[in-house]
């Protein structure tokens, strides 16, 4: 992956965060005009990009205008939105959020006067439906140790204190903004963030996150004195989401604090995060020395504040990126490394071991299928990994294979005799407490329980891989629709009866869903599973040209042409050669859309919520080399 591709990947990750969050009501943004104004080019562009992402991903028709703190009419005309923006426009002013305060009083007064003129011009030209000002925790000034400032609390900072200048400047910007909004009866918001950071994002203020991440990325040695104060930080992902959340969800005329998930820390705590994740690159030593100088200024100069974020949480905002994860992303974005980004601390460092185990037993399936002339293909994420990565998706934690129903039935017949004795074939027939729709092969004397299966400790919860049958469905659109609906309802009946959960009654058929939800209390499990199996095999002996993934997780994708699975080709997979459909491009496009586009950087954790894990005797297992055919 090229440097430009990696940079774009990191930028897309935070720009698209509001869209992925599920916190922003789309209808509040559709066809909206958004003006982003400020003199900090990096932050202004980041905010604008976060709205632009809605157009790329959801086609909402948002009109985005970027501007400095003056010249809105020219920016409006350049964007071809008309000479005067309507009264429902959203306006975001980046202010001095994570920016440097003026160096002297004269310069500060000039900037405040220009600020006042700029806001007046916004209100004269735009007439916003709501206007938001970005600020940050320095507005609270000097606070007592461990005192988390709420929105209307501030430190009584001594004018001689180094942090007073930034506090006074930010407070003045906010006061001018509030006075003018109230004077014009304009709905406003002020969002005070923790100190912002993000990959491929450079705010004016180079606070401790950037200084420490830079040292680790370069592998440089440093001896720093410890600061005692904890400060709130916020990833750009969460800040951009919070901006849109305040504009679309929160009540008007609010001042709110926000910070990241688990993102209050001292420098010493951040160094420990970095050392834990980059032990060979983190060469920072810490000591306590009164009045010591750090790499960029006196250590007694606070650059932020500890924020109380209860109010924004009360309204429903929830940050997603922890400081530890944010530091990992930032350091890796600064390092000139090739390859795909992944969190190395996934599963306490055991993910590659899990993948080796899965590979070893994939080769067992391959051996059995070759011996008995059973056709199979890599499936789901394993197939995607084979095509995109020539192996496992780097953050994948399971393996899937698929077969046509006739091959699946033959495999199940021979598996009892052919599989190693340490493999348990898990079906509802072989284990009464299991009601999964598909067959799982479990490794004895291991533990790999998901959040759901851990509720059933009597069930075999070993390391697993899935074997799926793809079944025939109708030739006609109406028959396929009825068949898939029947399968979905029977599967919902079994799964929700097993988990004692309610069947969701939304969608196109809420009444039918409510009836089935009630029926789960009346229908015995054996009958429900018979109905499920019968739905899979309904078209088994009919000559149809369509298949569907009835047993797997892709039932809602619908049906696909049988010809896609008629021919097999072999592709590299972790140094072996394993089978995939010859028409894998069509199949993967049906399954994932643009399958070559990877999921966002910050989401590259494993796909299963594993809550119990024990590799047993396989902690140091290495997959054998693939045996070649005679």
Image (spheres, grey):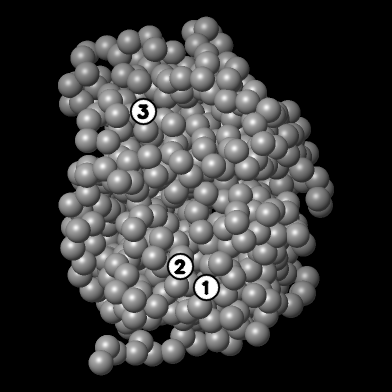
Between the residue at mark 1 and the residue at mark 2, the CA separation in whole angstroms equals 7 Å
Q: Are marks 1 and 2 in contact (CB under 8 Å)?
A: yes
Q: Is residue 320 visible?
A: yes
Does residue 365 sit above or below 150 in this rendering? below
- Residue density around tag 2, few if under 14, some if 14–19, many if 20 or more, within 10 Å: few
Residue found 30% across the figure and 46% down from its top: 541
Between the residue at mark 1 and the residue at mark 3, the CA separation in whole angstroms equals 35 Å
Nearer the viewer's eye, disc 1 or disc 3?
1
Residue 323 appears left or right of 52: right
Please tell me which residue lies in front, 165 or 76.
Answer: 76
Between the residue at mark 3 and the residue at mark 2, the CA separation in whole angstroms equals 31 Å
Please tell me which residue lies in front, 359 or 216.
Answer: 359
Q: Quadrant of residue 35?
A: top left
Q: Quadrant of residue 483?
A: top left
Looking at the rendered structure, the secondary structure element under dot 3 is: helix
Residue found 54% across the figure and 81% down from its top: 420
Residue at mark 1? 416
Residue at mark 2? 413
Looking at the rendered structure, the secondary structure element under dot 2 is: helix
Measuring from the top left, give residue 621's x and y in whole percent: 55, 86
Residue at mark 3? 482
Does residue 440 sit above or below 131 in this rendering? below
Residue 222 appears left or right of 371: right
Query: Which quadrant does the N terminus fall into?
Result: bottom left
Q: How many marks?
A: 3
Measuring from the top left, give residue 102's x and y in whole percent: 50, 44
Residue 84 appears left or right of 21: left
Mark 3 or mark 2: name the one nearer the start of the chain. 2
Quick one: which residue is furthest to the front in this view?
Answer: 541
- Residue density around tag 1, few if under 14, some if 14–19, many if 20 or more, within 10 Å: few
Q: Are marks 1 and 3 in contact (CB under 8 Å)?
A: no
């Amino acid at each position: 992956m090229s440097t430009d591709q990696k940079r774009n990947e990191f930028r897309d990750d935070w720009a698209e965060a509001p869209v992925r969050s599920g916190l922003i009501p789309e209808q509040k943004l559709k066809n909206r005009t958004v003006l982003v104004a400020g003199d900090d080019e990096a932050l202004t562009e980041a905010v604008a990009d976060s709205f632009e992402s809605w157009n790329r991903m959801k086609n909402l028709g948002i009109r985005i205008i970027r501007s400095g703190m003056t010249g809105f009419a020219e920016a409006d005309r350049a964007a071809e939105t008309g000479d005067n923006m309507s009264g429902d426009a959203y306006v975001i002013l980046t202010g001095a959020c994570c920016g440097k305060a003026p160096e002297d009083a004269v310069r500060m007064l000039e900037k405040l006067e220009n600020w006042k003129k700029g806001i007046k011009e916004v209100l004269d030209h735009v007439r916003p439906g709501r206007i938001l000002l970005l600020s940050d925790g320095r507005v609270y000034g000097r606070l007592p140790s461990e005192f988390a400032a709420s929105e209307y609390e501030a430190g009584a900072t001594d004018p001689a204190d180094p942090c007073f200048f930034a506090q006074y400047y930010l407070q003045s910007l906010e006061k001018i903004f509030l006075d003018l909004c109230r004077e014009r009866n304009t709905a406003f918001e002020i969002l005070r963030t923790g100190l912002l950071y993000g990959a491929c994002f450079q705010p004016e203020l180079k606070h401790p996150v950037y200084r420490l991440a830079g040292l680790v990325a370069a592998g440089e040695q440093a001896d720093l004195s410890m600061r005692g104060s904890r400060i709130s930080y916020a990833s750009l992902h969460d800040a951009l989401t919070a901006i849109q959340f305040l504009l679309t969800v929160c009540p008007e005329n609010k001042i709110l604090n926000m910070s990241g998930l688990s993102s209050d820390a001292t420098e010493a705590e951040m160094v420990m995060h970095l050392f834990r994740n980059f032990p060979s690159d983190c060469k920072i030593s810490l000591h306590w020395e009164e009045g010591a100088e750090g790499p960029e200024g006196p250590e007694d100069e606070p650059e932020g504040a500890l924020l109380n974020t209860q109010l924004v949480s009360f309204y429903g905002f929830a940050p997603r990126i922890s400081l530890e994860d944010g530091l990992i992303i930032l350091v890796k974005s600064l390092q000139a490394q090739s390859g795909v980004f992944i969190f190395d601390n996934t599963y306490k460092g055991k993910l590659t071991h899990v993948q080796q185990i899965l590979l070893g037993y994939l080769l067992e399936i391959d051996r059995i299928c070759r011996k008995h002339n059973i056709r199979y293909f890599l499936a789901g994420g394993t197939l995607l990994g084979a095509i995109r990565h020539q192996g496992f998706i780097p953050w994948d934690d399971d393996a899937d294979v698929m077969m046509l129903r006739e091959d699946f039935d033959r495999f199940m017949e021979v598996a009892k005799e052919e599989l190693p004795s340490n493999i348990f074939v898990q079906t509802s027939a072989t284990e009464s407490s299991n009601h999964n729709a598909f067959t799982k092969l479990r490794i004895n004397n291991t533990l790999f329980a998901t959040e759901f299966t851990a509720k059933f400790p009597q069930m075999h919860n070993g390391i697993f891989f899935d074997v799926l049958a793809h079944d025939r469905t109708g030739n006609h659109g109406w028959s396929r629709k009825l068949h898939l609906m029947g399968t979905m309802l029977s599967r919902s009946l079994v799964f929700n009866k097993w988990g004692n959960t309610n069947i969701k009654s939304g969608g196109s058929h809420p009444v039918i869903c409510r009836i089935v939800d009630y029926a789960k209390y009346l229908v015995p499990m054996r009958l429900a599973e018979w109905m499920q199996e019968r739905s899979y095999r309904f078209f088994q002996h009919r000559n149809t040209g369509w298949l569907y993934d009835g047993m797997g997780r892709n039932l809602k994708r619908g049906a696909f042409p049988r010809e896609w699975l008629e021919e097999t080709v072999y592709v590299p997979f972790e140094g072996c050669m394993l089978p995939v459909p010859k028409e894998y491009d069509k199949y993967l496009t049906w399954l994932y859309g643009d399958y070559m586009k990877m999921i966002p950087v910050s989401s590259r954790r494993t796909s299963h919520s594993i809550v119990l894990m024990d590799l047993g005797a396989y902690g140091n297992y290495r997959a054998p080399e693939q045996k070649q055919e005679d």
